[in-house]
C-alpha cells in the first residue's frame, strides 16, 4: 500500500545511464587463476580487477559488502540528492550485485523533503549508511556530473550568484535563498556568503563569523538596507553598529574582532558604547578580556557602585577586578559571620565539661576547617560547613580538659542524636571513657533542648 509521503514524492528525476555504469566501475571484480583454471566473479566490463591465486583453499565466498553512491540532479523545478546503495555478495566465486535508491532529498516548491526508501514505501528522514554511528552520507561517493553549473537552470536558484559550493551547502542556500538574493542585489556579498556557508565564513574565527538567521529576516534586511548596501562588513560588525546607533553612539573602526555583539548587549545602559569601544581598542582586549570585563561590571552592579567613567574604564582592569573580588568576598564573609553568630547563639549551651573532657561548639566556621586539617578527617569540607551553619547538623569538638586547645575527637550531632565520633584519620575505635562522656553529654542536651 502506497503511503502519503510516497504519493508526495511521486516520480523522482532519472539519473543518466552513465551514472550506474560509473557506480559499477567503483565495485571490484575478483579474479582467481592458476595454470589450469580462471574464475572471474563478474562479466562486467568495468571495475578494478583484484587478482588472487586459485588454490584448493581459496575462499570463493565473501560476506555481503555495501557500497554507497550519490548523484545530485537539477531540473527547472527541482533539485534532488539521490543516494543508491549497492550490495555485493559473492558465492562460489560469482557475484550477486543488487542496488536500489535509498536516501532521497528534494528541494522544490519552497519545501525540503528528506526521505529514505524502505523497498515498498518512502519514510520520513534519512537513514545512516552504517548504523547509528554514521551519517546518511558516510563514505558516499558522488558522481562528478558538474551539478553546480546546472543550478542556474533551476527556477529557485537561477537568480543567485553562487560561489563554488558543496552538497552540504544546498539545504541552507535553498532555505535562505530570498535573503541571499536580496543582499546580492544591494551589493552585499560578504553577508550573503556568510549565510551560504552554514552560517560561517570559510575563514576566520567561527565565533565572530556565525550569523543568526532568526535576526536576518526580510523585515530586518529592509529596515537596515542603507547600512547593508554595498557593504563588506561582517554580521558581527553590523550588529555592533546597530547596537551603537540604538544607544546614540558612533561606531569605532577595528573593534569587531575584539567584542561580539551578544557581549555588547550585556553592557548596562549607563556605559556609553563609543567610549567602551575606544577603551577596548586602546587596551587591546581579547574575547577573553571582554568576559573578564563583564564579570567586573557585574561585580560593580552587585556592590551598587555608581558606573562613572573612572570605575567602568579602569587603567588596570586586573587590579580593579581583583579589588572588586576582594570587596565582595569581604562582604560575604561578614554576612556569613553575622549569620553564624545567630546560629552560635542557638547552640552555645552545647559547651559542657564532663569527666576529664570538655565539649565545645566551634566559635566560627574556620575552626571546623582547622579541626579537619589537624585530625585529617572530612569534617572540614564544604558540605559539613554548610550543614553546620544552616542547622542541619551540629559539629562539636571533644577536647581533653588539660589540653582544651588541642583537637582530640570530633562529634556530629543531628536529629537529637550523636551521628558519629571521629578521631585522627577517621579513627573508628572510640575509647570507652569518650563513649561514656558522650552519653552523659547527650542526656544533658536533651534536658535543655
Image: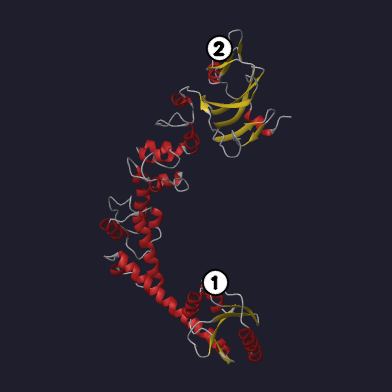
Eye-nearest disc, 1 or 2? 1
Relative horizontal placement of residue 327, taking residue 373 as reference (left or right)? left
Q: Quadrant of the N terminus?
A: top right
Q: How is the image coloured?
A: secondary structure
Q: Say which quarter of the image contains residue 199.
A: top left
Query: Looking at the figure, which quarter contains the C terminus?
Result: bottom right
Mark 1 element type: helix
- Of residues 285 and 439, the one nearer the viewer is 439
Q: Is residue 361 visible?
A: yes
Residue shown at the point (42%, 42%) measured from the top left: 200
Q: Is residue 23 above or below residue 310?
A: above
For label 2, the crowd category at 10 Å Cα-Cα, with few meaning under 14, some 14 to 19 and many 20 or more, is: few
Q: Quadrant of residue 423?
A: bottom right
At horizontal 60% and vertical 39% (from top left) the residue drawn is 132
Distance, label 1 to label 2, CA atoms, is 76 Å
Residue 334 falls in image quadrant: bottom left
Taking depth in this image into account, of 354 and 165 the one nearest to the observer is: 354
Q: Which residue is mark 1?
A: 383
Q: Is residue 246 visible?
A: no
Please tell me how crowded label 1 is: few (under 14), some (14-19), or many (20+) other residues with Cα within 10 Å.
few
| Disc on the earlier residue, 1 or 2 | 2
Q: Is residue 347 placed above or below 193 in the rendered structure? A: below
Circles 1 and 2: CB distance less than 8 Å? no
Q: Is residue 318 above or below residue 98?
A: below
Q: Position of residue 113 (x, y in %)?
A: 58, 34
Q: Position of residue 288 (x, y in %)?
A: 36, 56
Question: x, y percentage for residue 308?
Answer: 31, 69
Q: Which mark is residue 45?
A: 2
In what element is the residue under mark 2? loop
Question: Where does the image place residue 164, in percent across and percent down from the top left?
Answer: 41, 30
Amino acid at each position: 500500500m502506497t503511503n502519503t509521503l510516497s504519493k508526495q514524492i511521486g516520480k523522482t528525476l532519472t539519473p543518466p545511464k552513465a551514472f550506474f555504469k560509473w557506480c559499477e566501475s567503483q565495485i571490484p571484480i575478483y579474479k582467481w587463476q592458476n595454470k589450469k583454471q580462471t574464475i572471474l566473479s563478474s562479466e562486467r566490463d568495468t571495475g578494478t580487477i583484484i587478482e588472487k591465486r586459485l588454490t584448493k583453499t581459496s575462499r570463493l565466498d565473501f560476506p555481503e559488502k555495501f557500497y554507497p553512491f550519490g548523484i545530485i540532479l537539477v531540473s527547472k523545478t527541482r533539485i534532488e540528492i539521490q543516494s543508491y546503495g549497492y550490495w555485493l555478495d559473492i558465492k562460489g566465486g560469482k557475484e550477486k550485485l543488487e542496488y536500489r535508491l535509498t536516501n532521497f532529498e528534494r528541494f522544490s516548491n519552497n519545501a525540503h523533503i528528506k526521505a529514505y526508501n524502505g523497498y515498498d514505501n518512502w519514510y520520513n528522514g534519512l537513514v545512516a549508511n552504517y548504523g547509528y554511528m554514521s551519517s546518511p552520507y558516510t563514505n558516499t561517493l558522488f558522481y562528478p556530473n558538474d551539478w553546480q553549473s546546472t543550478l542556474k537552470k533551476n527556477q529557485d536558484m537561477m537568480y543567485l550568484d553562487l560561489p563554488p559550493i558543496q552538497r552540504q551547502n544546498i539545504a541552507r542556500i535553498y532555505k535562505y535563498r530570498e535573503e541571499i538574493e536580496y543582499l546580492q542585489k544591494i551589493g552585499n556579498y560578504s553577508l550573503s556568503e556568510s549565510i551560504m556557508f552554514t552560517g560561517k565564513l570559510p575563514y576566520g574565527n567561527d565565533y565572530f563569523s556565525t550569523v543568526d538567521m532568526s535576526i536576518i529576516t526580510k523585515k530586518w534586511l529592509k529596515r537596515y538596507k542603507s547600512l547593508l548596501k554595498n557593504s563588506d562588513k561582517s554580521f558581527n560588525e553590523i550588529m555592533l553598529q546597530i547596537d551603537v546607533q540604538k544607544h546614540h553612539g558612533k561606531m569605532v573602526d577595528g573593534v569587531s574582532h575584539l567584542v561580539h555583539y551578544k557581549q555588547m548587549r550585556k553592557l548596562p545602559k549607563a556605559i556609553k558604547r563609543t567610549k567602551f569601544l575606544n577603551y577596548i581598542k586602546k587596551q587591546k582586549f581579547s574575547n577573553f578580556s571582554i568576559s573578564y570585563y563583564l564579570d567586573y561590571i557585574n561585580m560593580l552592579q552587585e556592590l551598587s557602585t555608581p558606573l562613572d567613567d573612572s570605575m567602568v574604564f579602569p587603567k588596570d582592569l586586573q587590579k580593579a577586578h581583583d579589588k572588586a573580588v576582594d570587596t565582595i568576598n569581604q562582604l560575604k564573609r561578614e554576612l556569613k559571620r553575622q549569620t553564624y553568630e545567630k546560629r552560635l547563639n542557638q547552640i552555645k549551651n552545647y559547651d559542657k565539661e564532663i569527666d576529664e573532657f570538655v565539649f565545645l561548639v566551634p566559635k566560627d566556621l574556620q575552626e571546623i576547617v582547622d579541626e579537619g586539617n589537624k585530625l585529617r578527617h572530612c569534617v572540614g569540607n564544604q558540605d559539613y560547613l554548610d550543614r553546620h551553619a544552616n542547622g542541619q547538623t551540629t559539629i562539636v569538638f571533644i577536647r581533653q580538659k588539660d589540653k582544651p586547645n588541642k583537637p582530640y575527637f570530633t562529634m556530629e550531632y543531628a536529629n537529637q542524636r550523636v551521628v558519629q565520633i571521629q578521631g585522627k584519620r577517621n579513627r573508628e575505635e572510640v575509647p570507652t571513657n569518650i563513649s561514656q562522656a558522650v552519653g552523659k553529654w547527650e542526656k544533658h542536651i536533651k534536658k535543655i533542648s
